[in-house]
């Protein structure tokens, strides 16, 4: 199991196009053992510290494997509407990891 945190920064005025992209992309996750665990649209009040631009959305996702994530990224249906992503997203910040077993101070097998 892998987990991804994606901070998404939108081009000014392109929110509607971004939502079109998300409406098409998110349903494809399930075809690749993926799940959108949290989709957060934070406001200024939600930040304790913020040096720089605030993300428009923050996504927490999981995939059963790295291969599932790669296959999702290569999906031909998704490629057909990547122009919406390119037209609306200025930049993203991706963090990838695994769940840590804090009690035993190690990663699960």
Image (cartoon, rainbow, N blue to C red):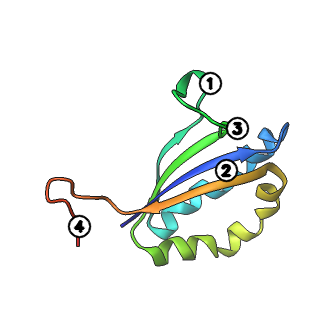
> Distance from label 1 to label 4 (Cα)?
36 Å
Q: Which residue is mark 2?
A: 22
Q: Residue 53 — which label?
A: 3
Q: Residues within 10 Å of mark 2 (few under 14, many from 20)?
A: some
Q: Position of residue 18 (x, y in %)?
A: 75, 46
Q: Residues within 10 Å of mark 4 (few under 14, many from 20)?
A: few
Q: Residue 71 — which label?
A: none
Residue at image point 76% right, 63% down: 82
Compare marks 4 and 3 and give the one earlier in the sequence. 3
Q: Can residue 25 be seen? A: yes
What element does badge 4 sit on? Answer: loop
The quadrant of the picture occupied by the N terminus is bottom left
Q: Which residue is mark 1?
A: 44
Q: Residues within 10 Å of mark 3 (few under 14, many from 20)?
A: few
Looking at the image, residue 91 sits to the left or right of residue 98; the answer is: right
What element does badge 2 sit on? Answer: helix
> Distance from label 4 to label 3 (Cα)?
35 Å
Q: Nearer the viewer, residue 88 or 79?
A: 88
Compare marks 2 and 1 and give the one earlier in the sequence. 2
């Amino acid at each position: 199991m892998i987990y991804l945190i994606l901070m998404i920064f939108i081009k000014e005025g392109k929110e509607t196009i971004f939502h079109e992209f998300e409406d098409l992309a998110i349903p494809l996750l399930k075809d690749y053992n993926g799940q959108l665990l949290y989709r957060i649209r934070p406001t200024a009040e939600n930040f304790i510290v913020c040096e720089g631009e605030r993300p428009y959305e923050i996504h927490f996702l999981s995939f059963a494997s790295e291969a599932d994530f790669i296959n999702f990224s290569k999906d031909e249906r998704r490629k057909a509407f990547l122009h919406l992503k390119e037209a609306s997203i200025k930049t993203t910040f991706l963090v990838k990891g695994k769940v840590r077993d804090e009690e035993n101070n190690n990663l699960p097998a």
